[in-house]
Image (spheres, helix red, strand yellow):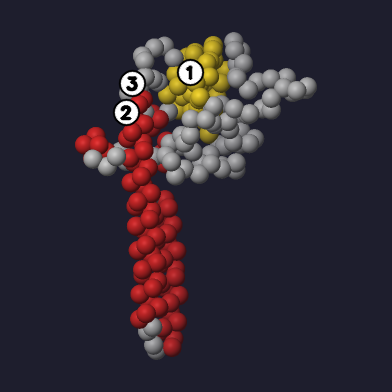
């Protein structure tokens, strides 16, 4: 959605400049205008196709998520942005990543998976960015302010974890773009879901 709005803004700017030149010259170059319009339409169609691909991929993954075993645990995805202190996203088993919460870990009972001594040959902090874990613990009911992202986030008491996958792929949608400067990955970037019947006919 955001990409479409940006593309439309660019198209609008290009068209405005073209029309201004045409008016000033009292001449409309129809072929140039048609090329510009074709470019804009092509870009919009590409974005629509990308969103459709995202929706189909998400629908397929939601079907896999629905088969997860019930239990007293969470599915966690490590999400690291430099200078921030949140751990990543948690969701309950069988629930969509649309419902995931970005959390700050309380490590008083168990250290985070990437918490190693800072000296020697220990792995670097955040070495496990985008790893997927089975996380054990509970929400404390407290909120904590993370200043570098300007976010107020729930605190989760970590009691244990198990590594599920070191390379699970995309988090919210295949076309997402990871940034080291901002919190670019949020559930809100997921496109609206397809209904099951529509998803099944496009695989």
**Numbered label tally:** 3
Q: CA distance from mark 3 to mark 2?
A: 7 Å
| Residue occupying the point 43% across, 79% down | 20
Residue 29 seen in render: yes
Q: Are marks 3 and 2 in contact (CB under 8 Å)?
A: yes
Q: Are marks 2 and 1 in contact (CB under 8 Å)?
A: no
Task: Residue 9: give x, y in percent of width and height.
Answer: 42, 62
Q: CA distance from mark 3 to mark 1?
A: 15 Å
Residue in the foreground of this view, choosing between 146 and 120 = 120
Direction from residue 7 to residue 147 in the image, left or right: right
- The disc at residue 63 is 2
| Residue occupying the point 45% across, 28% down | 101
Q: Quadrant of the C terminus?
A: top left
Task: Residue 26: give x, y in percent of width and height.
Answer: 39, 89
Is 1 placed above or below 101 here? below
Direction from residue 84 to residue 71 in the image, left or right: left
Q: Are marks 3 and 1 in contact (CB under 8 Å)?
A: no
Dot 2: element: helix
Residue in the foreground of this view, choosing between 21 and 125 = 125
Q: Which of the 4 quarters of the picture holds residue 190? A: top left
Residue in the foreground of this view, choosing between 123 and 27 = 123
Of mark 2 and mark 1, the one earlier in the sequence is 2
Residue wearing tag 3: 67
Task: Residue 39: give x, y in percent of width and height.
Answer: 40, 67
Residue wearing tag 1: 134
């Amino acid at each position: 959605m955001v990409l479409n709005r940006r593309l439309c803004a660019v198209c609008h700017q290009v068209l405005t400049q073209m029309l201004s030149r045409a008016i000033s010259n009292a001449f409309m170059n129809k072929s140039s205008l048609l090329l510009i319009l074709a470019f804009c339409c092509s870009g919009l169609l590409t974005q629509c196709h990308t969103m459709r691909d995202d929706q189909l991929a998400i629908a397929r993954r939601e079907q896999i998520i629905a088969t997860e075993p019930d239990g007293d645990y969470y599915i966690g995805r490590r999400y690291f942005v430099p200078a921030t202190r949140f751990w990543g996203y948690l969701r309950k088993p069988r629930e969509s990543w649309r419902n995931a919460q970005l959390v700050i870990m309380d490590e008083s009972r168990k250290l985070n998976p990437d918490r190693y001594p800072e000296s020697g040959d220990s792995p670097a902090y955040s070495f496990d960015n985008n790893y997927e874990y089975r996380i054990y613990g509970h929400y404390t009911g407290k909120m904590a302010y993370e200043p570098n992202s300007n976010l107020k986030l729930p605190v989760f008491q970590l009691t244990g974890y198990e590594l599920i996958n070191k390379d699970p792929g995309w988090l919210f949608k295949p076309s997402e773009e990871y940034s080291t400067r901002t919190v670019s990955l949020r559930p809100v970037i997921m496109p609206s879901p397809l209904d099951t019947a529509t998803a099944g006919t496009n695989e």
